[in-house]
Image (spheres, rainbow, N blue to C red):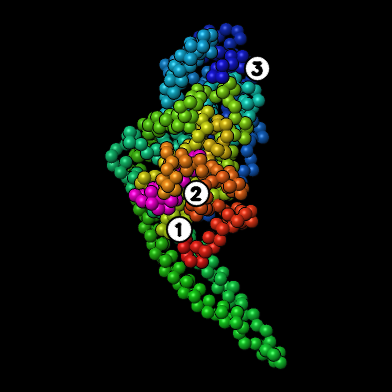
Amino acid sequence: MADEIDTRVAPPPIFGSIFGEREEAGDALISDAEAVAGPEDENGGEDVTLGPAKFPEITKKFEEIPHKIFADPNYYKTALSNEGNSATRVHGLLQKYLNAKDPKDRSVFRQQFITAFWDFLGNLAKKTGGNIPPPKRFLLRFAILHPTFLETGMRDFFAKIVVENQLAQPVYYLDEWLKAIGTGTVQPSTTDEVKVPRTAGSVRIQQLLDKSQGKLDGNRGLVKAKDDERDNLEKELQGRIDIILEHYSADGLPDIRALYSDSQKKAIVEIQDILKGLLRVDREQASFLRDYSQAAEDVETLQRKLEEEGGTAEVDTGAVGAEFDTIRQMVKMTIGRQGNHFPVLSSEYFHSGFNDIGFRENVISVLAHIESIDPECFVRVYKNHNNRIVPYVLLIPSYGDTGFCWEPFNRHNRATSRGRIAVPMYPKNLFVAILIAVADLRWQVAKEKANFYWMEEGLTGNYYQWFQKMKLKGNIKDYFVQDYIIWITKESDGVQKLDKEVRGIFWRFMPFAQPVKEKLKTRNFIYQELYQRDLNRAMSDGY
């Protein structure tokens, strides 16, 4: 059966060898291998970076020398050890499931194992703030409970995946995410049920700190934008001066310079406008610098108060537990009702190609490719300036095919906080799974931006009006997501698959990168007409 584990690939573990009873000959799963401790991942979170940055180029996807943790004969024993009755129950049900012959019995034991495994994993999650052994960490990260559940080639592949976050991007494996939540590096996901076990004062201070940090980040972005604007104006000024200072001899008078040419007279007039612009930018910069200094003082004061309250003194296991409950729901959402909910990685279920495995470097490469087509997918406007804010990306070890956005931004800092998207690690098509998540993020951000007018204005408003006009039924966001996939995968290559009106809406509110536009305008009249509309709007200051 497709939903069964092949016991020839994964021989059932022996209870006695796991929990300290007499080990019989042949119980060891990989008897000739040595246990090698791997590097602990100390990755935390990052501050939001505003500006025209881009994803780093991936020059290293794999380690040259793979670790040997999956060759450790005690991997399974270490993964389950010191976890109490929950581990005992997992082990017992796993043996019953693997040894059952009757399909009905296997189905019952499978479901019981799934429930018991999630309870076990919830207890393990609360320990991620400390230094847990590599088998426990990789169990959380990759859902690898028993290395021999994977074929040899697949084990070798996972052993080469880069362990540490060397790219400084907000892309987290599950163990890293839970650690970041527990230590306060990342705020817990927003849910009505979550009650963070801190004092009321500490919670209030943390909320104020989030808002102040958002103002600080936003004002820093504005200061940087004004500095760039001044730099551009100064370059323009220098260019005009160079034009004015270039002289030729007057006719018949080689020692006398000629009069100013028409282009030089024009440059003199333009210099006056540039100088006025420099003074304007300087006044605005002074205001932004004052706001930035005040925001920095507020952040410093609130951080000091939070430390006095003890809000970040130790790992918050309550927050980790609540976050894990949220993540369990996320796993279900990535898989869907009809998908495979078995929570352990096994060759029996694993059908992704190497390029479709959602490890960090693969996901960043896909995000960079999407952004190269849709350069504004991670852009939010703050005080009329575009800020690139890459969302937190949580890599969920599931067999799902659907990524999604569960928070477009922090509710206490709508301006500059990161959104949050979840990506399944073992989909059939990683690119599509991430596209769905980015589309979901785009829809939610646009809808929140439009607020009460989301059915009338902007991206969501125009799309909603088209949706109503076409008398379509169902979830409007689902239609948008599917159209976005076509927009990125087909229309960006000049393959016309979208409704004409939808194409116009997307071209206006989710424009392609300029090189893509330049390519498309030469393909046919449809894209040439859309390109001309851009020029007309630019001339009339319609943007």
Amino acid type for the residue under numbered disc 1: His
The x and y percentages for residue 115 are 43, 20
Picture coordinates of residue 489, whole percent (x, y): 58, 43
Residue at 48% over, 15% down? 107
Mark number displayed over residue 385: 1
Q: Residue 525 in the image: state x and y as whole percent.
A: 60, 56
Question: Which segment is the magenta one?
Answer: 436-463
Q: Name the residue under label 2.
A: 502
Residue at 30%, 43% in the rendered image: 204
Front position among marks 1 and 3: 1
Q: How far apart are marks 3 and 2 (CA)?
A: 61 Å
| Cβ–Cβ under 8 Å for marks 1 and 3 | no
**Label 3, on which residue?**
32
Amino acid type at circle 2 is Val
Check the picture and name the quadrant holding the N terminus.
Answer: top right
Toward the viewer: 338 or 60? 338
Residue 33 spot, x, y in % from top left:
64, 20
Q: Is mark 2 on a helix, strand or loop?
A: helix
Q: In the picture shown, does residue 125 fall above or below 224?
A: above
Q: Residue 418 carries which label?
A: none
396 w.r.t. 413: above or below: above
Contact? badges 1 and 2 (CB < 8 Å): no
